[in-house]
Image (tube, rainbow, N blue to C red):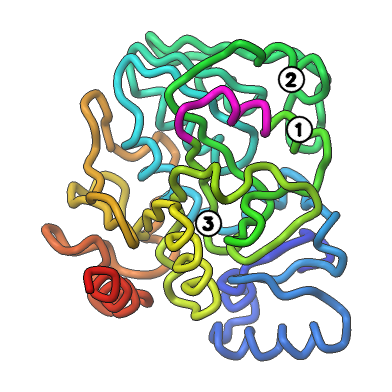
Amino acid sequence: MVRANGAVSLRELARVVQTSEVTVRRDVRALEAEGLLDRRHGGAVLPGGLSREPGYPQKTHLAAAEKSAVADLAASLVEEGDAVVVGAGTTTQELARRLARVPGLTVVTNSLLVAQALAHANRVEVVMTGGTLRGSNYALVGSGAEQSLQGLRVARAFVSGSGLTAERGLSTTNMLSASVDRALVQAAAEVIVLADHTKLGTDTMFQTVPTDAITRLVTDEQATADDRTARELDALADRGVQVTVAPLGLPGDPQPHPSYGQGPALEPRRGQQTAPLPGQRRPGAHGGPPPVPGGPGVAPGLPGQARLAELGSRRKR
């Protein structure tokens, strides 16, 4: 599966071979020792992950429920009438589908997939950069894209990437994509990184956004279930990044989302609707109960609840 897709999550591997994630994690560790693959938080990739990038079809199936949860939360940061920048990626594509419901929005993007998701939205203006099409991720790159962003100023930039570490920040495997992403974030007052748990602790070849330039990270609750990714979140928060954890519940649940480390809890903003998207797979179908209404944002028994409580109390001291 890893050879066919370039990357695969532990959850998907466990489902296909019909065993537990604990068993899969042990087998993946053994395969890594033999040099057959590289472990990543929550998954595995082919060796040489610093420079290898999975294709778009493979990325759409990796951590799909987690990306959906991240996009739900990120959309709550956008208000009616805002002007935002949205970079390329499968997670930002999910975000764009939700932004189609926010009236009066202006979205600047270099992603054909983001533009397509917003093409038929009422009262949403889409501004595309120039540039050369990079077919592997349907994004416009190169000097034309970068020059078209000069002089631009918006409230927020929403970007994703191939990896995120506290030491180096957000990174990607392609030099041209990294250059355009840097131009995108320079146009914004706030930089919001969308990264599911499989990207945490992963370092790739080209730095996109240094840690001190990241305003907020939106990730999923699986990041709190593993000690290594939880430490990465802690390190990011210590360096001033506001880390917000999206619960893997059902879309449209009304309770606020928990913030990790600092800042207030988030609630859907004015003009933001939270009904499920047409044809959208409900994250609850991938395993795990929905959050408890009125609860802290993480349902009892879900991995990571104890860590959220522990780290939250630690920061209050």
Task: Reply above or below: 253 against 41.
Answer: above
Residue type, mark 3 in image:
Asp
- Residue marked by disc 2: 146
Q: Nearer the viewer, residue 95 or 234?
A: 234
Q: Looking at the image, is mark 3 or mark 2 earlier in the sequence?
A: 2
Locate residue 129, reporting x and y percent. Answer: 68, 15
Out of 143 and 95, give the one closest to the viewer.
143
- The number of numbered badges drawn on the structure is 3
Q: Residue at label 1?
A: 179
Query: Residue 293 appears in which quarter of the rendering?
Result: bottom left
Please give the range of residues in magenta. Answer: 182-190
Asked whether the beta carbons under mark 2 and mark 1 sit within 8 Å of each other, the answer is yes
Q: Residue at 82%, 75% (x, y): give it.
A: 37
Q: Position of residue 159 (x, y in %)?
A: 57, 38
- Residue 71: x and y in percent read 44, 43
Of pointers 1 and 3, the one earlier in the residue sequence: 1
Q: CA distance from mark 1 to mark 3?
A: 22 Å
Amino acid under disc 2: Glu
Answer with left or right where residue 246 lies relative to residue 191. Answer: left
Residue at left offset 55%, top offset 29%: 86
Q: Earlier in the sequence, mark 2 or mark 1?
A: 2
Q: What residue is shown at x 67% (from left), y 33% (from top)?
A: 181
Q: Residues within 10 Å of mark 1 (few under 14, many from 20)?
A: some
> Label for residue 196?
3
